[in-house]
Amino acid sequence: MHSTSSYTHASMLKSKLPSLAVGLLIAAFSVWFFWPGTAQRLESVTGETGRLSQIRALWNLLLDATRPPLDLAPQAAVEPVKGLSPYGVNTFLEQEVEPAKRERTMQMIADSGFKWIRQEFPWADIEIDGKGDFVDRRNPPARSAWDKYDNIVTLAEKYHLHIIARLSSPPQWSHRGYKDLGQFGPPADFQDFADYVRAVVTRYKGRIHYYQIWNEPNIYPEWGEQRVNPEDYTKLLCMAYRTAKQVDPSVVIISAALAPTVAQDGHDLSDLVFLQRMYNAGAGRCFDVLSAQGYGLFSGPGDHRVSPLITNVARHELLRDIMVQNGNANKPIWLSEMNWDAVPDKPSSIQGYGEYGVVTEAEQARYVPQVYERAKSEWPWVGVMAIWFFKRATDTEKNQAWYYFRMVEPDFSPTPLYTAMRQYILQQH
């Protein structure tokens, strides 16, 4: 028989056990959290370097674990991925006035081991003044608008680089008879764009095999001065797909890269919602490769959080899940743009400072190779990943935050990112 005093003591001890357990757990967590090396391990799963940010990220990961798992179909036979080099860069070669600078750019890209360039073939720079008119009269003497692009294709062949030709940026004449949609708005008649696609694919048949139709139609201003419209973009995509395949059945058609966003305001629409509406409109039969953007933005390459409300380097896993649910498990995702913004710490003098996140050049040089490594081990359905971007023709945009994604300065001086990627790629062979 227990005495009253011993019974009371036991009851008090029992009532304190939950608090003691919580205290012990907190103590154990604190010891582990501040143990040497833990910060680096946490960065590899959260993408965060700050301790408070890591705690918040761990909570996000716990919440992710309560949701139904994504269906990424990692064992699916995905084509075209197998055997293709993943190393690509975005270029602005059409803005280089001097052919010698175009060639030096190509040479540096090839020397560092890259096998792909993603290069825009702007509609407004090729069919400039009217439908079927491919003469450039902007600066005398008049010349063929194709000349510059012929040179780009020839140089790519010389340096054994594949071109992903981005077809976008309509000319002003294509908007006539329709409301002013600004520089990037779709044409009044989608057939005009399909005819442009026909002209490009016909001219470079057997020389360019990869074409991307438009860019970021889910955000402003890439669909012009109007609300974005997944159904209209799908119509444009399908017309371009059928036209290109009629000319050259071997070409690979890549959908427009969807910008990662959680917005739902009409001018910007979540990439996840936009993609599902594309599928609802029949887009699944109108592309060979789905395109996404792979920016790290505000966290590092190890960020494993996957949430519709978070834009990070792993967001394309959500797009992959949508693809699988819509019967496209055998199609790959290519990352049309990926990088971190190594903007200098001069917030008062740089427009858009912090808009894309801020890292040091050393962090940028460390992060980008890590994404390629992560793709090897975790994303077998991801193919080409193109760094945004190689270089600009001039440094007149140094006061803008997006300029600092560059790998090489306009005078061809390499940044730490260029050096790091060259070392990384060459080590893979």
Image (spheres, helix red, strand yellow):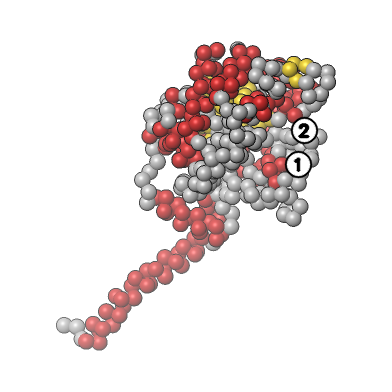
Q: Secondary structure at mark 1?
A: loop
Disc 2/disc 1 C-alpha distance (Å): 10 Å
Indicate the position of residue 366 as horizontal and vertical percent values. Answer: 64, 43
Image side of residue 51 versus residue 155, left or right: left
Relative to 11, is 35 on the left or the right? right
Locate residue 323: give its quadrant: top left
Residue 385 makes an appearance in the image: no
Label total for image? 2
As displayed, is residue 104 above or below residue 9? Answer: above
- Can you give x and y, in whole percent of width and height, for residue 329 in the image? 41, 29
Image location (x, y in percent) of residue 294? 56, 39
Estimate how packed mark 2 is, as few (under 14), some (14 to 19) or many (20 or more) residues with alpha carbons within 10 Å.
some
Figure quadrant of residue 201? top right
The residue under label 1 is 397
Q: Amino acid at mark 2?
A: Ala
Q: Nearer the viewer, residue 157 or 249?
A: 249
- The percent position of residue 118, horizontal first and vertical second, equals 63, 28
Q: Quadrant of the C terminus?
A: top right
- Name the disc covering residue 393, or none: 2
SS of the residue under disc 2: loop
Residue found at x 76% / y 52%: 349
Mark 2 touches mark 1? (CB < 8 Å): no
